[in-house]
Each structure stands twice: as structure tokens, then as C-alpha cells.
Image: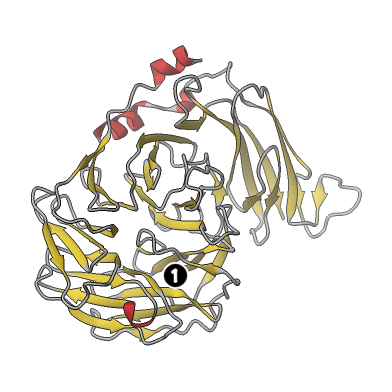
């Protein structure tokens, strides 16, 4: 196996290039404007900025905010940016600058003793939204439509309630994002791991379940990234067990209504970004991964402890972390390999692969009768996959065109609750480490997959 794969997967020369920034602040807020302009924010009231692509950095301490932790930043050019600090009560604040950080105006100071703000996101320089952890089982949201001169509460009385112990993680400034002109996405963790989504700038919300790890204070979704209105990814896991690989990644193709697993990442991850439609970079305390095909192939390419990643194009990919860590990605080799490698054109007859895929029913309809055994009234159907071999480490990976997969392993359920009438596809594959005798950092679905179709009437 190694000889065959060695010819296909050459060593990766992509690497993070460390920047020289005169600070020991820990960074989680990151905003990439273009190839030249990058802003980041962090502990000790610190905000840094480069306007020459990282050759030089300005390091500023916001006056009166020396004890604050700025977990999120939204920048628009070399002069204008918003920053958000976390904390209970008045520690949660929003500042704004229009002159490159020379002067910071305090625009919002939280007066709700129960609120703890996590993130800010903007559709443009005038229209932004910010969020707090739930108070009385409802997320607290505020917005501005005039460049921050006025921040007003958003009525969340009709927003889906959170569960006890469900909240958001201010780990990378990407638990709340905007997309397009009106869309917003908010992700949760703790006792549940869900995606809340709005298509009217936060006025109304729906919520979707996900297969990301949940159930403990340190588990859940830590970051969401959307390539466009329909295609996106979420990453997370359990930061208290950063080496755990289970349930760390999921993807959507319908704007966040449904989420399905892909090949798992190489541990807990707190940030993700799209380099292009197919290529994703993720970061976390245990290192970085990239994917060629959005969901099935992941390779670890760095071991740096990182909190957040963001980019504007392939030449402006940045990440930040603790103790003044600021990195720029040399991404040429990643994108070159993305263009050259097509797993569908390679035969892997000797690898672990799916031998059969069976479904308990092939049709879902409210008019099913006992004489049609392939039809069911239930919205969940049983799925069973069998693999050709089991003599190497492996994981089952399912991809669905609608609905979601419940469970792990060879026996799972496909939940099609709420799915509109039509034909829907499920694909099963086996993910294995590509170099099991040399390294364990590259996992991908490299064998033959099997596909089945279900009709919903």
C-alpha cells in the first residue's frame, strides 16, 4: 500500500510562516481584509495591524481596556474596524475605530449582568450583529444599522430556545458569522451542538441538529465557515480532550438546514476557512489540517497551537494563537496538489472498502401499506454498511444529499424528517490512514464507495 500511495501523495511543503510581532498577547480575533491589510485582537486590550502584508506590525493597547480580552474583530480596510471583548457584565464591550486604531470609540457596554458576549459579525461597515451566551435559555442579540452609533437589542422571543447547558464558544470569533447580504449563522456547544440560522439579518431564526461532539462543557461546535449561501462546514470537538478525533467535522449543502459527517479531523479544531470551493484549512490546539475535496480527505500539515484562521484569497491566509503567535500560510503547494489530485480517477482495489450498503426501506410515504414492504411511514430508515476488510484502522463515513446521519459505525440511521418530496442519495465509504506504517495524520476515503437512493413522497 505504501508504495502505491507514496507515488500519489508526495510530502507537503506547505507551512506556516511565523511573523515577528512585538507582543505576548494571546490572539483569537482575526480579520483579513486583503493581501496587505490584516487585523488581530486579543488579551490585555491588544489590537495589532499590518498594512504591508506582515512586513511591519502596529501593536496597540486600547486605552481603558488594558484588562479586557478582545476575542473578535471585524475590519473593512486599513482604517476601520470593530472589536468585541468578552466577559461578564460590563466586560463585554464593542469599540470602533475609523483611523487605524489611533482612536477607539466605546460604542457598547453590556448592562445585562447575566450576559456574556462572544462574537461580532458584519454584513458591511454599517450593518453588524453581536451575540451573547443564552440568558434564560435564549441567545442575546444586538445589532446596528448605522455604523455602531446605535446598538439595539434584537427581539429573540420567537428564536428557538437553547437547552440547559447549551451556549457558544468565544474561541475564534467564528461562532457567529454573516454570509451574503442577509444571512447569519450561530453555532452552539455544551449539552448540544446545533446551528442556528437566519436569512433576515437576525430577526427570525431556525435551528438544525448536527453530528458534532456534545454533552460536556468543553464539547460542541467552535467554528462555522460558509463558502456561499448553500455550502459550508462546521468544526469542533472537545477542547478538554484535544486529541480526540470523533465527531469533529460536518458539512452542509443546503444552507445549514442539514449537516452530515465527513472524514474526521486530526483532533479538536476551533477555526476553519475556505481557500476555494474545494479546499478547506482548519486549525486548533493540536495543529492544522487541509482538505482537497471539502469533506473526505484530510491531511495534517502543522503542529502549531492555533486559535483562529481566516483568509481573503489563496495569497492571504492567516492564523493566530497564544503568546503573540501570528502566522501566514504558504499555500501554493496545497492548491497545486488540489488541482493535480482526483481520487475518483485512482483505483484502490487492495484497500479497505465498502462491500455492501443496505437500507431498511427505499421509499418514505404517508400512504405506505403493508403490501409494500420497501415503504415506510417513518422518517428515519436504518442503514447498514459492510466493509471488505477490517485489518487496519478505519472509520465509516456517510454523505447524504438531504437529512442527517444519526450514530457512528456500520449501523446508523438516516433521518429525513422535514425533507421535501424527491429522490435523495446516501453514499458510504471507509476512511483509513493513507500511510499507516509511516504516520497517522492523513485520513481519507480512498477505497470504493457504495451509493443508494431513497424516494420521499
376 to the left or right of 415: right
In the rendered image, residue 59, in percent from the top left (x then y), is placed at 13, 61
The quadrant in which the C terminus is found is bottom right
The structure residue drawn at horizontal position 33% and vertical position 82%, both measured from the top left corner, is 90
In the rendered image, residue 376, in percent from the top left (x then y), is placed at 81, 52
The structure residue drawn at horizontal position 40% and vertical position 55%, both measured from the top left corner, is 226
**Would you say residue 201 is visible in this rendering?**
no
369 to the left or right of 44: right
In the rendered image, residue 248, in percent from the top left (x then y), is placed at 51, 48
380 to the left or right of 425: right
Whether residue 457 is situated above or below residue 245 in the rendered picture = below
Give the color scheme: rainbow, by chain, secondary structure or one colour.
secondary structure
Q: Quadrant of residue 112?
A: bottom left
Tag 1 residue:
199
The structure residue drawn at horizontal position 18% and vertical position 53%, both measured from the top left corner, is 34
Residue sitting farthest toward the right: 371
Return the residue nearer the eye: 199 or 85.
Answer: 85
Whether residue 73 is situated above or below residue 239 in the rendered picture = below
Whether residue 106 is situated above or below residue 242 in the rendered picture = below
Dot 1 crowding, Cα within 10 Å, few <14, some 14–19, many 20+: some
Amino acid at each position: 500500500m505504501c508504495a502505491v500511495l507514496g507515488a500519489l501523495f508526495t510530502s507537503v511543503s506547505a507551512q506556516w510562516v511565523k511573523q515577528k510581532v512585538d507582543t505576548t498577547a494571546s490572539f483569537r480575533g482575526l480579520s483579513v481584509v486583503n493581501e496587505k491589510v490584516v487585523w488581530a485582537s486579543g488579551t490585555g486590550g491588544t489590537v495589532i495591524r499590518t498594512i504591508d502584508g506582515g512586513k511591519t506590525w502596529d501593536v496597540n493597547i486600547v486605552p481603558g481596556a488594558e484588562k479586557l480580552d478582545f476575542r473578535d474583530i471585524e475590519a473593512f480596510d486599513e482604517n476601520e474596524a470593530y472589536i468585541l471583548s468578552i466577559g461578564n457584565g460590563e466586560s463585554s464591550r464593542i469599540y470602533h475605530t475609523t483611523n487605524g486604531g489611533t482612536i477607539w470609540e466605546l460604542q457598547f457596554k453590556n448592562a445585562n449582568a447575566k450576559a456574556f458576549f462572544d462574537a461580532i459579525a458584519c454584513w458591511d461597515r454599517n450593518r453588524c450583529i453581536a451575540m451573547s451566551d443564552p440568558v434564560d435559555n435564549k441567545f442575546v442579540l444586538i445589532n446596528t444599522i448605522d455604523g455602531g452609533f446605535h446598538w439595539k437589542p434584537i427581539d429573540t422571543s420567537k428564536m428557538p430556545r437553547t437547552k440547559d447547558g447549551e451556549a457558544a464558544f468565544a474561541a475564534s470569533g467564528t461562532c457567529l458569522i454573516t454570509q451574503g447580504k442577509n444571512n447569519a449563522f450561530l453555532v452552539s456547544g455544551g449539552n448540544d451542538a446545533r446551528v442556528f440560522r437566519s436569512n433576515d439579518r437576525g430577526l427570525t431564526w431556525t435551528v438544525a441538529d448536527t453530528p458534532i461532539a456534545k454533552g460536556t462543557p468543553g464539547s460542541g461546535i467552535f467554528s462555522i465557515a460558509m463558502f456561499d449561501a448553500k455550502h459550508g462546514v462546521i468544526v469542533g470537538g472537545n477542547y478538554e480532550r484535544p486529541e480526540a478525533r470523533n465527531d469533529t467535522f460536518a458539512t452542509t449543502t443546503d444552507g445549514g438546514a442539514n449537516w452530515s459527517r465527513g472524514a474526521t479531523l486530526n483532533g479538536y479544531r476551533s477555526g476553519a476557512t475556505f481557500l476555494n470551493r474545494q479546499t478547506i484549512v482548519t486549525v486548533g490546539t493540536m495543529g492544522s489540517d487541509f482538505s482537497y475535496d471539502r469533506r473526505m480527505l484530510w491531511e495534517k500539515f502543522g503542529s502549531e497551537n492555533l486559535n483562529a484562521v481566516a483568509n481573503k484569497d489563496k495569497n492571504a491566509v492567516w492564523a493566530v494563537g497564544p503568546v503573540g503567535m501570528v502566522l501566514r500560510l504558504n499555500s501554493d503547494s496545497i492548491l497545486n496538489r488540489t488541482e493535480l489530485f482526483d481520487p475518483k480517477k485512482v483505483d484502490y482495489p487492495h484497500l479497505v472498502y465498502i462491500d455492501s450498503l443496505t437500507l431498511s426501506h427505499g421509499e418514505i410515504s404517508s400512504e405506505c401499506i403493508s403490501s409494500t414492504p420497501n415503504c415506510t411511514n417513518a422518517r428515519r430508515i436504518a442503514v447498514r454498511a459492510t466493509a471488505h476488510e477490517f485489518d487496519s484502522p478505519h472509520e465509516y463515513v456517510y454523505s447524504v444529499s438531504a437529512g442527517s446521519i444519526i450514530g457512528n459505525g456500520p449501523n446508523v440511521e438516516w433521518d429525513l424528517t422535514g425533507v421535501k418530496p424527491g429522490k435523495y442519495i446516501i453514499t458510504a465509504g471507509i476512511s483509513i490512514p493513507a500511510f499507516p506504517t509511516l504516520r497517522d495524520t492523513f485520513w481519507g476515503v480512498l477505497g470504493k464507495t457504495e451509493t443508494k437512493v431513497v424516494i420521499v413522497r
